[in-house]
Image (tube, rainbow, N blue to C red):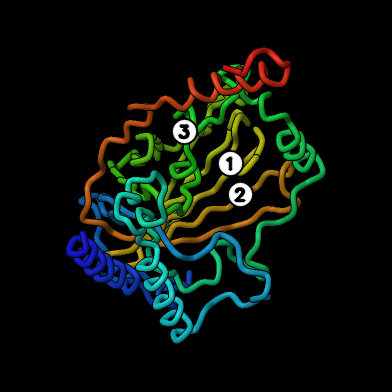
């Protein structure tokens, strides 16, 4: 057991150091950069996004309040933060090793490197704007609902728990240290995003056709793309507002921008506009880094007994509260 533990620690140390050393603090800070002639291109001349990418990162979505208006870390600060991250990853290895089997254990999270920014949300504050009063009321209504109210039926449970919609693929694509792999396919008239988590697929037309009728509302919205120079712009609307991105409604308008920085990096940026949910629009930016890995099957429901156990447990809780037997 001790030998196995030593080997595991050694492998983890090397792998984490390699991952965390792959990005520098200033690598993706400027959007005004010129396109490098070495940037890969498709046979039809557009920047080539084809391949597998990961957006795992240690950079938080929002800036810590104590950092104020500090938008970027210095190189020395990034080095120190990376050293701390490596140490924390090593310390996360549980003893005994059988605890590694715990689902969502920190040791299985693929944290990725720092982007050099203090937050993925860009702008003076680095934070998501305030919710509107209507959005606050929606949030409070869900938070204050009795726990057993969420288990009257399988339809009461969350979308991700039912494998219907998961946050990683979006849109927008979110940086999350679990299944953070995405594959992009291209043709002259289409771009396709395949996300490892739940195998979500989004087919984006580049042929200039307008969005579908406003009466057609979709889980992931209706996406249309076009080229702005060497930047791929994808505009998505017509969301159905059910289980929307971070509580957004049907009026969400999402704009994504992808720019090939170099042979190993794509800069991914998205802007969220939903007046019914946030007091103003906001933008986040993160790197997509080339990965030699392949996507694997994400069998979300394989061996999934959660729903039946949740519903059974809720019924037992109700019987106990009513004094019926011992709740079994």
- When asked about the image quadrant of residue 213, the answer is top right
Q: Nearer the viewer, residue 158 or 245?
A: 158
Q: Secondary structure at mark 1?
A: helix
Badge 3 crowding class, 10 Å Cα cut-off, few under 14, some 14 to 19, many 20 or more, is: few
At 40% from the left edge and 60% from the top edge, which residue is drawn?
111
Q: Which mark is residue 245?
A: 1
Residue receiving disc 3: 209
Q: Nearer the viewer, residue 45 or 243?
A: 243
* Marks 3/1: CA–CA distance: 25 Å
Which percent across, then down, holds residue 195?
Answer: 36, 41
Residue receiving disc 2: 272
Which percent across, then down, holds residue 201?
Answer: 37, 34
Which label's residue is closer to the chain start, 1 or 2?
Answer: 1
Position of residue 327 relative to residue 20, above or below, is above
Q: Secondary structure at mark 3?
A: loop
The quarter in which the C terminus is drawn is: top right
Which label's residue is closer to the chain start, 3 or 1?
Answer: 3
Badge 2 crowding class, 10 Å Cα cut-off, few under 14, some 14 to 19, many 20 or more, is: some
Disc 2 versus disc 3: nearer the observer: 2
Q: Secondary structure at mark 2?
A: strand
Direction from residue 166 to residue 49 in the image, left or right? left
């Amino acid at each position: 057991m001790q030998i196995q533990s030593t080997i595991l620690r050694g492998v983890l140390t090397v792998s984490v150091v390699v991952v965390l050393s792959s990005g520098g603090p200033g690598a993706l800070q400027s959007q005004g950069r010129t396109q490098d002639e070495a940037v890969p291109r498709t046979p039809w001349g557009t920047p080539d996004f084809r391949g597998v990418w990961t957006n795992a990162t240690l950079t938080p979505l929002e800036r810590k309040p104590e950092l104020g208006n500090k938008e970027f870390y210095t190189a020395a600060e990034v080095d120190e933060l990376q050293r701390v991250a490596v140490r924390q990853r090593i310390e996360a290895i549980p003893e005994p090793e059988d605890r590694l089997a715990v689902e969502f254990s920190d040791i299985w999270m693929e944290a990725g490197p720092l982007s050099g920014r203090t937050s993925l949300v860009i702008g003076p504050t680095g934070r998501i704007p305030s919710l509107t009063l209507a959005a606050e009321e929606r949030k409070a209504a869900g938070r204050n609902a009795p726990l057993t109210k969420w288990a009257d039926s399988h339809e009461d449970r969350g979308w991700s728990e039912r494998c219907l919609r998961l946050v990683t693929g979006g849109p927008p694509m979110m940086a999350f240290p679990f299944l953070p792999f995405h594959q992009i396919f291209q043709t002259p008239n289409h771009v396709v995003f395949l996300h490892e988590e739940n195998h979500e697929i989004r087919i984006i037309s580049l042929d200039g056709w307008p969005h579908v009728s406003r009466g057609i509302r979709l889980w992931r919205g209706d996406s249309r793309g076009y080229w702005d120079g060497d930047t791929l712009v994808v505009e998505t609307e017509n969301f159905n507002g059910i289980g929307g991105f971070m509580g957004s409604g049907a009026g969400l308008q999402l704009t994504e921008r992808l720019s090939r920085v170099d042979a190993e990096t794509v800069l991914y940026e998205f802007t969220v506009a939903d007046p019914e949910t946030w007091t103003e629009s906001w933008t986040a930016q993160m790197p997509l880094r080339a990965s030699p890995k392949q996507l694997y099957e994400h069998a979300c429901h394989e061996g999934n007994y959660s729903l039946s156990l949740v519903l059974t447990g809720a019924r037992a809780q109700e019987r106990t509260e009513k004094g019926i037997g011992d709740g079994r």
